[in-house]
Image (tube, rainbow, N blue to C red):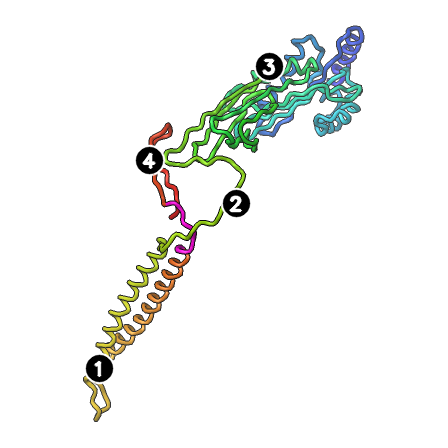
């Protein structure tokens, strides 16, 4: 097998010497183990695109046989580094080599191809794409990008200009913060995920398509949340302190007061019951025998009632103290607007918005 490959390569060298075009080596697309099937399809697309341009191709199988296992393994570790690839492929009848990688994130295929010059070593062109998995456009987008790559043409970028009907909306592109509207950036061709948000408005998520060499303009219309007050983006200003809001009892204060009153009432009932039990026992006292008329359980019950009465009185005192502290804090704070409730029906269904201090 090795002899046949060497003979084919020798014939390739002879024909290449007579032809002006240089040969092209194609490495198998590098990908994780669970994506080897797709990687093999992309490798075949590179071979087909090169042959369609009339280029003489050294396939990955030819390279594997000619180089041997050791050098072929080293070749896989080079990645797209020209200085590493050039000496390993010095004996191959090719002046250029195509290196490719395939990976994925949660929503995109990540495709990267390099066209490498072997002599002198250097990168001639590259394609870097994030292709939406749900679009099912992996093969078609790669097929559209390969001819220009193989001709050594640098991939042109596109321009995206984003604006919104509400100035200063926050923009995220592909999960990364991008500033505030209006914004303009140069991007790789393809689909990009845009997130635009502003306080008081429903956020917007959408996909925008950027084409190479073209400018894409997108105006995003934000819809206000019913009952919510829009907040403009502006630098903080120093304002004079506002007057105190008068006597106010917060919700937590009312809860503490209620707990204190309930505990005080329960303590009073238990204290009265314990006092009655004690009076009944004292009424049956016989000084001659130094004994009481009654049962031991009656004495134990009276003692337990007295203990729980003390506990309830302690809780009542803590509740009243908490009520007083919270009321003082709330009354000392600056006055703030009361709570407001807005109800509306929008594109996403019925909404209820609540604003203010509680």
Q: Mark 1 or 3 closer to N-term?
A: 3
The residue sitting at the bottom extreme is: 288
The label number, if any, that marks residue 235 in the structure image: none
Please tell me which residue is depicted at 36% across the width and 54% down the height of the picture.
248
The label number, if any, that marks residue 144 in the structure image: 3
Q: Nearer the viewer, residue 311 or 103?
A: 311
Q: Nearer the viewer, residue 17 or 168?
A: 168
Does 148 sit above or below residue 334?
above
- Disc 2 and disc 3 in contact, CB within 8 angstroms: no
Tag 3 secondary structure: helix
In the shown orientation, is residue 345 left or right of residue 185? left
Q: Mark 2 or 3 closer to N-term?
A: 3
Camera-near label (4 vs 2) is 2
Camera-near label (3 vs 4) is 4
Q: Main secondary structure of the magenta part?
A: loop
The answer for how far apart the CA atoms under marks 2 and 1 are is 72 Å
Q: Is the residue marked by circle 1 packed among few (<14), some (14-19), or many (20+) residues within 10 Å?
A: some
Residue 67 sits in quarter: top right
Return the x and y of residue 155 as percentages of the image width and height: 65, 18
The stretch of residues the image draws in magenta is 330-337
Return the x and y of residue 197 as percentages of the image width and height: 48, 32
Q: Mark 2 or 1 closer to N-term?
A: 2
Quadrant of the rendering where the N terminus is positioned: top right
The residue beneath circle 1 is 281
Does 69 sit above or below residue 262?
above
Residue 311 sits in quarter: bottom left
The answer for how far apart the CA atoms under marks 1 and 3 are is 103 Å
- Disc 1 and disc 3 in contact, CB within 8 angstroms: no
Camera-near label (1 vs 3) is 1
């Amino acid at each position: 097998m090795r002899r046949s490959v060497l003979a084919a390569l020798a014939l390739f060298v002879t024909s290449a010497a007579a032809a002006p075009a240089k040969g092209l080596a194609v490495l198998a697309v590098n990908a994780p183990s669970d994506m080897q099937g797709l990687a093999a399809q992309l490798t075949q697309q590179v071979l087909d695109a090169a042959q369609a341009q009339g280029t003489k191709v050294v396939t990955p199988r030819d390279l594997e046989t000619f180089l041997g296992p050791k050098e072929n393994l080293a070749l896989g570790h080079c990645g797209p580094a020209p200085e590493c690839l050039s000496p390993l492929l010095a004996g191959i009848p090719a002046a250029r080599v195509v290196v490719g990688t395939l990976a994925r994130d949660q929503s995109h295929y990540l495709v990267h191809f390099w066209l490498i010059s072997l002599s002198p070593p250097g990168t001639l062109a590259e394609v870097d794409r994030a292709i939406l998995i749900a679009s099912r456009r992996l093969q078609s987008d790669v097929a559209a990008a390969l001819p220009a790559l193989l001709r050594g043409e640098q991939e042109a970028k596109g321009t995206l200009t984003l604006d919104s009907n509400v100035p200063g909306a926050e923009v995220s592109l592909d999960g990364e913060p991008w500033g505030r509207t209006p914004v303009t950036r140069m991007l790789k061709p393809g689909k990009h995920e845009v997130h635009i948000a502003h306080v008081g408005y429903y956020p917007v998520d959408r996909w925008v398509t950027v084409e190479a060499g073209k400018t894409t303009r997108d105006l995003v219309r934000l819809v206000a949340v019913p009952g919510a007050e829009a907040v403009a983006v502006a630098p903080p200003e120093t304002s004079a302190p506002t007057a105190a809001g008068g006597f106010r009892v917060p919700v937590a204060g009312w809860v503490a007061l209620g707990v204190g009153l309930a505990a005080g009432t329960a303590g009073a009932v238990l204290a009265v019951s314990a006092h009655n039990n004690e009076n009944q026992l004292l009424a049956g006292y016989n000084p001659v025998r130094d004994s009481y008329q009654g049962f031991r359980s009656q004495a134990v019950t009276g003692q337990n009632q007295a203990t729980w009465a003390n506990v309830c009185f302690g809780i009542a005192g803590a509740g009243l103290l908490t009520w007083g502290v919270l009321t003082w804090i709330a009354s000392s704070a600056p006055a703030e607007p009361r709570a407001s409730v807005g109800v509306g029906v929008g594109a996403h269904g019925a909404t209820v918005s609540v604003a203010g201090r509680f």
